[in-house]
Image: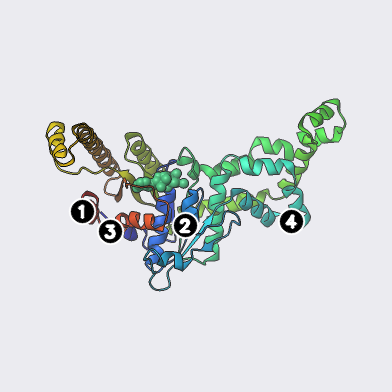
Amino acid sequence: MASIESVIEGREIVICAGSGGVGKTTTSAAIALGMANRGFRVCVLTIDPAKRLADSLGLKELGNEASRVDPALLKAQGVEPENGGELWAMMLDAKETFDALVARHAEDAEARDRVLNNRIYQQISGALAGSQEYMAMEKLFELHSEGRFDLLVLDTPPSRNALDFLDAPRRLTQFIEGKSLQIFIKPTGLAARVASRGTGVVLSVLKRIVGFDLLADLSEFFTAFSSMIDGFQDRAKRVSSLLADERTSFLIVCGPHGDQIDEAVFFHSKLVENGMNFGAAVVNRVRYRLGPRQPKVGDLTKRIASAIDDEDLAGRLARNLAEYDVLAVRDRKNIDRLTGALSGEPVIRIPYLDTDVHDIAGLCQINRYLFTDEDERVQLATN
Ligand SMILES: Nc1ncnc2c1ncn2[C@@H]1O[C@H](COP(=O)(O)OP(=O)(O)O)[C@@H](O)[C@H]1O
Ligand SMILES: [Mg+2]
């Protein structure tokens, strides 16, 4: 089965999707590193890197801008990119991206500030359903339009459900076009009516409870926001079509457990249904069998005991190994099921490593599996 390099050859955007905790951030960072090493100018857009991984890439927490990973940091781990390859990384900040969008679509500085300083906006820009997912794509779109990089690798937000990501532009436009917003925006809408009454008893009570003039703020926000709606809708459509563009490829990152495989199969079908380009499934934290036969606990215990002179510990080790083998067999079955369901599309396995992956050395470890073919992968994992 293919190396990840051949899977993403010729693509400009790679999106690592999958449910939370499976290894999306790790995989995205590793792919970006591997491609930079092969001479590409690559930027990885990460969402929630573990602090140690972020630190090891020299990532700043704020800024929402790409910064180059210091070549000296890479060199210290033996990574010296060929042909001017560069690794860049950025940590996505959904709120800042939303702010930048407002600034882009506002008619003038005053309209911009009216929205940005509005308390309702400040609340919903962080909490709006799908806004994190949408803003990730938005930033991707922006970077892609700038054309500074050969390849962008997007690590998707840690939503429970991978489908949330695909759905985000639709949900944002739905919110904008939806009834709830229209009620407020129309000149005769609720907000205008309530605001014009101004000093009703209800309002003053509300004001006391929430501490500020809620409805006046609502009214102001929706009025200011309404002038930006066309811009937002148009942009969301363009972002959506970039996702389906042939320059974009989706990787599904998943774990080897039954339910994780089910989700991956389902997500793959949704990608195909939505006309997206599927690249490969990356099954992470796979347990490999260490031999062709199930170890017999009794025999093993004896063999281990003769080496370590501790019957009890030897027994526990032997049972542990036997259990590991059961899990490895189960992983194999699940992955076979995935391979069958994807009918010949690439499935790349990464083994369960002994330690967490939190630095460049760890990413290099992952890349030994990503950037090679299946035979070599099996060799590496079982030796
Ligand atoms: N193949 C692996 N072997 C061992 N640990 C791994 C492996 N892949 C990822 N990890 C660890 O698992 C945790 C979750 O990975 P992460 O990439 O942050 O997942 P996600 O972004 O999908 O939530 C991290 O602590 C990471 O170091
Ligand atoms: Mg993550």
Numbered disc in front, either 1 or 2: 2
Name which residue lies at 62% across and 40% down: 127
Whole-percent x, y for residue 145 in the image: 54, 63
Q: Examine the rendering and report whether any part of residue 23 can be seen.
A: no
According to the image, label 1 marks what residue?
379
Q: Examine the rendering and report whether any part of residue 232 can be seen.
A: yes
According to the image, label 2 marks what residue?
56
N-terminal-most mark, 4 or 1: 4
Q: CA distance from mark 2 to mark 3?
A: 25 Å
Relative depth, front residue between 82 and 141: 82
**217 to 153, vertically: above or below:** above
Left or right: where does residue 149 sit relative to residue 192? Answer: left
Neighbor class of circle 1 (other Cα within 10 Å; few <14, some 14-19, many 20+) is few
Whole-percent x, y for residue 203 in the image: 82, 29
Left or right: where does residue 293 sit relative to residue 96? Answer: left
Which label was assigned to residue 107?
4
According to the image, label 3 marks what residue?
372
